[in-house]
Amino acid sequence: MKPAPFAYTKARTLKEAVALLSKHKDDARLLAGGQSLIATLNMRLSAPELLIDINGIKGLDGIAKKGKFVEIGALARHAEVERSELIATHAPLIALAMPHIGHPAIRNRGTFGGSIAFADPAAELPACLLALGAEIDIAGPKGKRKVKAEAFFKGLFETALRPNEMLTAVRIPTADKNTRVGFAELARRHGDYAIVGLAASARANGKSLADIRLAYFGVGATPVRAKQSEAALAKGDVDAAVAALDLDPSDDVQATGAVKKHLAGVLLRRVAKQLMETRP
């Protein structure tokens, strides 16, 4: 199929992009990497009247350490994030997840911010941000605001972004010597969307773990925290953590809900082992 007719414009500044969004609202879509958008256009799942190309906006593609945070610009390509030594050192969970995102051609063009804004429930990065307690920077006609990852993902492909706003950057707390992270997913083929995936972070507390955050993807309309399992894992009981999995995945074309929940337990055992071993 081919997309429905649409107009195209290229925004040169953040202010210009926001003004266009404010004018056209739900009739406009932002074009960054286009790896998800072009597919939805071709299948006519999306039919905007206007595409706003934001690739010419300067300053939205950086990766930098700023104080106690790593800031990743919305236009940073997946491949750039994957190769970044700064990410490997200060945001190791992101480094673990990047090779699982699509295939090399997709990572070369796709953007970090685009993946977050699209909010596919089977995507890796939204779950990583939830596991890390990240913040999302948003720009709109009234200026800039920050939203915690917990409040950003609202529903199936739904986020806290308003029609006249755009995501500009993501800020992730930097890892230190006590940071522990884990990541695993199960997919039919490497690079495909996961049947089930798990991103996790914790802090070493002697021989135990504290501040555990288990964020599953592929099991709901948004990334899902398994809070009962977090509490059990903090006591060092992996079996109890698996038994306590508070997930209720629905059946889909990949697997039944029962199979997904079983696989979630399998991943929890793998990731729990990583949390005990991982060093930043």
Image (cartoon, helix red, strand yellow):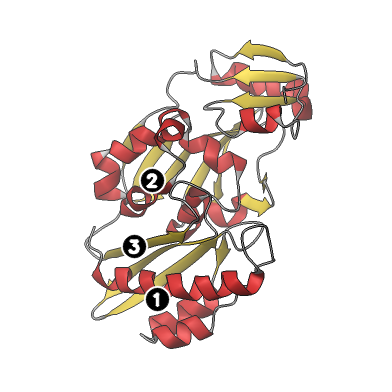
| Disc 2 + disc 3, Cβ < 8 Å | no
> Against 158, is 60 above or below?
above
Dot 1: what SS? Answer: helix
> Against 3, is 243 above or below?
below
Q: Would you name the residue on which mark 1 appears? A: 269
Residue 119 visible in the displayed image: yes
Q: Amino acid at mark 2?
A: Met
Indicate the quadrant containing the N terminus: top left, top right, bottom left or bottom right: top right
Residue 41's x, y, as percent? 70, 28
Q: Residue at x 70, y 24 (%)?
A: 21
Q: Residue at x 62, y 59 (%)?
A: 254
Dot 3: what SS? Answer: strand
Horizontal relation, residue 124 to residue 97: left or right: right
Residue 259's x, y, as percent? 59, 72
Residue 39's x, y, as percent? 64, 32
Give the numbered dot on residue 181.
3
10 Å neighbourhood of mark 3: few (<14), some, or many (≥20)?
Answer: many
| Disc 1 + disc 3, Cβ < 8 Å | no
Dot 2: what SS? Answer: helix
Q: CA distance from mark 2 to mark 1?
A: 21 Å
Give the numbered dot on residue 103.
none
Q: Residue at x 37, y 49 (%)?
A: 94
Horizontal relation, residue 254 to residue 115: left or right: right
Q: Would you name the residue on which mark 2 appears? A: 98
10 Å neighbourhood of mark 1: few (<14), some, or many (≥20)?
Answer: some
Along the polypeptide, which appears first: circle 1 or circle 3? 3
